[in-house]
Amino acid sequence: MKTIVQTEALVEKAKKLKLLILDVDGVLTDGRLFFDNQGNEYKSFHARDGHGIKLLRQTGVEVAVISGRKSASVALRMKNLGIEHVYQGHEHKVAAFNEIIEKLAITPEQAAHVGDDVLDLPVMIRVGLAIAVNDANFAVKQRADWVTTLPGGQGAVREVCDFIMQAQGTFDSVLSAYLE
């Protein structure tokens, strides 16, 4: 089976991963913010992204979220996905990143980060695999090891999860459960 990304260097980086860190607005969502007249916030998450996260977690890769904003809908969605490492309201994301890798007893090279804006760069420059969604800010794309083909909130996270599983040789075993 062909991997999504053909470069050997990216596959080698992905093979080492034990943690995938995601931004929320612009990565798990399309970046738009919806508010009603009472100030309630609404977000739209892609179902395939969520299923990709669940599949990746089944293979032993942890998933974490670090977001600059706080949102009840994010807390609920992450709980539904079983993500334990959720850091909201962290505009300065490095402290949260350091806490997560310490908790998991892994090195920065064993982590990947998916981002879309300059708030993500301090973590992206520290991880083993830096990923930008297709519609990310140009400065983020320039510093990413890989740019997804899909935009944030529209399947980019699933693309990342599938790529990691393919690189680590776990995709076919996860897929086989659906082919029986």
Image: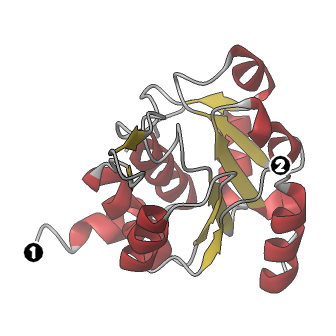
- Chosen colour scheme: secondary structure
> Which residue corresponds to the image point at 23% horizontal and 69% vertical from the top-left?
176
Task: Provide the secondary structure element on which disc 1 rests.
Answer: loop
Image vertical order of residue 114 relative to residue 147, above or below? below
> What distance separates the C-alpha of mark 2 from that of mark 1?
40 Å
- Residue 157 percent across, percent down from the top left: 46, 47
Q: Which label number is shown at residue 123?
A: 2
- Residue 30 percent across, percent down from the top left: 42, 35
Whichever of labels 2 and 1 marks the residue nearer the N terminus, that label is 2
In this rendering, position of residue 43 left or right of residue 113: left
Task: Provide the secondary structure element on which disc 2 rests.
Answer: helix
> Which residue corresponds to the image point at 74% horizontal and 37% vertical from the top-left?
9
Tag 2 near tag 1, CB within 8 Å: no
Looking at the image, the residue that sits furthest to the front is 38
Within 10 Å of the Cα at label 2, are there few (<14), some (14-19), or many (20+) other Cα atoms? Answer: many
Residue 44, can we see it? yes
Within 10 Å of the Cα at label 1, are there few (<14), some (14-19), or many (20+) other Cα atoms? Answer: few
Question: What residue sits right under mark 1 in the picture?
Answer: 180
- Residue 42 percent across, percent down from the top left: 35, 51
Quarter containing the C terminus: bottom left
In this rendering, position of residue 29 left or right of residue 100: left
- Residue type indicated by callout 1: Glu
> Which residue corresponds to the image point at 36% horizontal and 77% vertical from the top-left?
80
In this rendering, position of residue 101 left or right of residue 17: right
Image vertical order of residue 7 relative to residue 180, above or below? above
Tell us which disc is closer to us: 2 or 1: 2
